[in-house]
Image (cartoon, coloured by chain):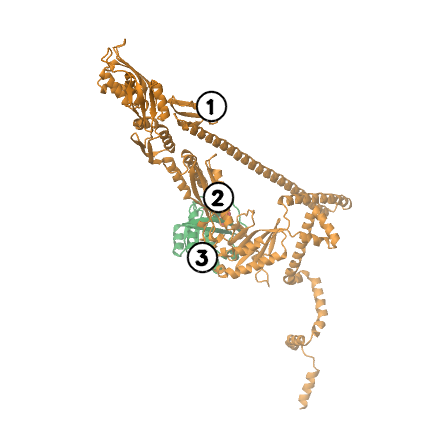
Chain colours: A green, B orange
Amino acid sequence: MSVRKKICMLGGFAVGKTSLVRRFVSSIFSDTYQTTVGVHIEKKDVQLGEREVTLMLWDLHGEDELQSVRSSYLRGSSGLLFVADGTRAATLDVVLALRQRARDTIGDVPAILLVNKCDLPECELDDERLQALQDEGWTVLRTSAKTGEHVEQAFVELTARMVAD
Amino acid sequence: MGDELERLQELESRRPTADEISDVLPDAVALRSQRDSELDGALSPTIEGSLERAVQRNPQRIADAIFPIIGPAIRKSMRAALSSIVEGFNRALEESFTLRGLGWRIEAWRSGTPYPEVVLTHSLVYRVEQLFLIHERTGVQLEHLTAPAIQAQDPDLVTAMLSALQAFMRDSFPQEGEQRATLNHFEFGELRFEVAAGPHATLAAVVRGTAPSAYRELLQDTIERIHTAVGPELVEFDGDTGPFLRIHDLLEECLAEQRVQHQKSRFASFAKRAVAVLLLALLATWIISTLWGNWREAQADDKAAAARLEHAFKSVEELEAQAAGTQQLLARLAADVQRLADEEERARQERAAADGRRQVLDARRARLSELRRALDAEPGLAVTATELAAEGAAQAFVVAGLRDPHARAPLTVAAQAGFDPNLIDAHWTPWLSPAPDLVLARMREQLAPPATVSLAYDGERVSAHGTAPRAWIERAALVGPGLAPTLSFDTTALQPSDPPVPAGPLPMDPALADYVRRLADEPGLVVLDYAMGDPLPSGRQLVLEGLRDPDARDPLEVARDAALDTTRLHALWTPYESGDPVLLLAKARRQLAPPAGVVLDGDGRRLVASGRAPGDWIRRARTWVTAHAANASYDDSAVVDIDRQELDERATELELLAFYFELADHDVDLSDTERADLTRLLRQLDDAARRSSRLVRIVVHGHIDGSETIRGGVEVARRRAGAMAQELERLAPAGAVFTSLGVPTADEQDGLPVGSIHRKVTFEVITFGADSDPSGTPR
Ligand SMILES: Nc1nc2c(ncn2[C@@H]2O[C@H](COP(=O)(O)OP(=O)(O)O)[C@@H](O)[C@H]2O)c(=O)[nH]1
Ligand SMILES: [Mg+2]
């Protein structure tokens, strides 16, 4: 029996949402920057033990302006992947605002925070900051869409949580 | 009192102030409107006038104000009008170039019906190609159905995009009044999406052609019934699509009910469209260039008009390019179709050729075993091996065996059985057959009995009767037994015809006589003649002539046993094959060369083999025993046929496999490793089958699960089995000795378990003997 789950990618402008999805879905990283228009949807089958889950990944338009994240796109999500850019601390604020917005729209669903671009040396979000987030209840993973670090784990971890729910 | 009256008059005569009227005006208007409509009449000229003035002064403001009311209304009627115009145009365009179009014109003229109406009634050609059932909240696909032979692009993604589109439209064009507007339909190329939305799920149909309005109603009705059937499941949906299998047949109706009235091939419609586009483009070019010419003369400097026309020209170019593109597409399509057909034909020819070769080979094999049976049946001939000669060799059959000198000539036997002796390449080893007729013939020749002696065979021994010279009797008693290896020879009934010879000049040396007797007793040694006397010129005293089996004891050893000086002997041994059972074991060991894993045991009457051996050896041993020891028993029940074992093991390996399918689907989709494994397994199976000379038949069983009984049921099972059987044939080595066959295994309509692990094919391997041994169990 197949299980299908919707996941939304949420985060500020150019933090790497699209790249993460691409990495996970076809494992090819593109350095060409592409602004996503509206929403881009990808699909991926995840094997969890005996179960197979089909993830529908909704990659939403990411601009700093929160208005542009349509609440109607959030509806029905079984899980959320928040993405911040490790080299730009301000993108974490966008994440926090987006989370509030998601809560208001769809309530609490399993979520993970990805601090992306961890392959780059100039890191503005240090371990202490992440620890503080973890203490607040976030699950945080440092990822890189470029090297693929933790990308697979992030999606699988979120899937596991959604299925356990 | 006077004061009061005065004030009253004053009040009556006084006109009310604006302030006072503004207090009562709203109520007054309301009151009066309730009573009659005088007020409307009284006010309308004023309102009209002021509206007119307002529009003149600032039209935008008024337009903005009334847009929300009038916008949707206009849009609706525009949409309806436009789409009917476009539809009509499309159809007319498509049909007016055909013979059918002409036919319709005639029909319209005859019946007096307007032409468009005739076109309409004939054009309800449509087909619902795909159906999506979409969960409203999550945008996840609950069900997806396709019409037969439709290849759907990833339906999950289509579903998600549809729902995103829906959300996007709602957000971007919020509509008052309609509390939840939906995207009802939209068109894409030749396809039209019809969408019926319910509160928790949406049904979208992809229609090719023009569906009647009744189809929309069917969709709407279906989505309502779906809500009734699985309402709670829709509300609680969290990704598990299992519960929605139930409503599959509801959906099926939306797919199946739509019958195409006269299906035209897609190719034809393609072609028609291309022609239409081309003609239209030419027409437009002509019109526009004519216009262009006129226009240029008249309005040479009207830049704006020129630009507009240039634009029109561009459109024509685009149309032309489109037509050219379509033609290329058509050409490519035709080439593809041709290529596919060619490939199919080539594959068919190859298969036929392989079948032909196999048939020829089978026929030759059958001939060979006929030949073998004919030769074996002849007394004095025993075939030990047969083989088909390599293709192109001068002789077709190779035969090796044993031949008694008194047997009939093998080629005569073969010719009598209908074989051309020239086609047989035979290799014979001399042999003393135990067959009584031949034993008698041999004795008559070697012993040369006088006319007074008769030889007779009574079923177990050969006996000599009559009278003969003493010397002949003596020699017969010595030599005879060796000539009748499996029989006993009795000379006791013979009467000497001459008086006993007194001690003569040539006394028989008792030691030498003893030696000859010993030799005659020795299995595999046959004394045919001997002479004894004074030392010969060579100094030897005994001259012997005889036959010697390679497995018999060394005659010199026998001489040593008899304590005879071997320098006194002169012997001439001719090699031969003895039929003496005592030698059986030694002979078997030497000639059969049992492989390392086999132990051969027994005595003259019994031969017992045990251990592990290739099937080939086992069969060779059996034939050998038949040829060399027809009277001995042979027990090889303790021999494990390693080829058979291999065959059984591989068969079991295959039988443990299962391949799984998507719901209601029968595409065999093997991964590279699966394909490699299966190819290996089939090759091993084929090898083992050949080595153990067995035919293998693989039966592919197609299974369905409970949810599929309503989606094609046994037919799906049959297709699965059939598809897998085809796959097996593709993967099997060329000329494999097995055939595969697909059968459905889904008789029970109820009570089949539900779940993806039941949607599968499994295998059953049946093996049976090629020729000699149909039971397959060792003798
Ligand atoms: N070095 C590095 N660059 C990244 C990484 N992820 C994304 N980028 C780059 O960041 C830019 C924005 O990425 P994109 O995926 O379009 O961001 P989105 O707007 O959140 O979808 C692109 O130039 C990417 O190549 C990463 O992990 N490491
Ligand atoms: Mg993006």
Decide if residue A42 is on the left or right side of residue B611: right
Amino acid at the residue labelled 2: Gly
Amino acid at the residue labelled 3: Val
State the mark number for residue B421. Answer: 1
Q: Is residue A18 visible?
A: no
1 or 2: tag closer to the N-terminus: 1
**Residue assigned mark 3:** A109
Decide if residue B376 is on the left or right side of residue A70: left
Amino acid at the residue labelled 1: Pro
Q: Are both tags, 1 and 2, on one chain?
A: yes
In depth, the one of B641 and B322 nearer the eye is: B641
Subunit of mark 2? B
State the mark number for residue B742. Answer: 2
Subunit of mark 3? A
Q: Position of residue A135 (x, y in %)?
A: 38, 56
Task: Give the mark toward the camera: 2 or 3.
Answer: 2
Residue at left 22%, top 19%?
A: B562
Task: Give the mark toward the camera: 3 or 1.
Answer: 1
| Residue B615 occupies quadrant | top left
Please say if B270 is above or below B484: below
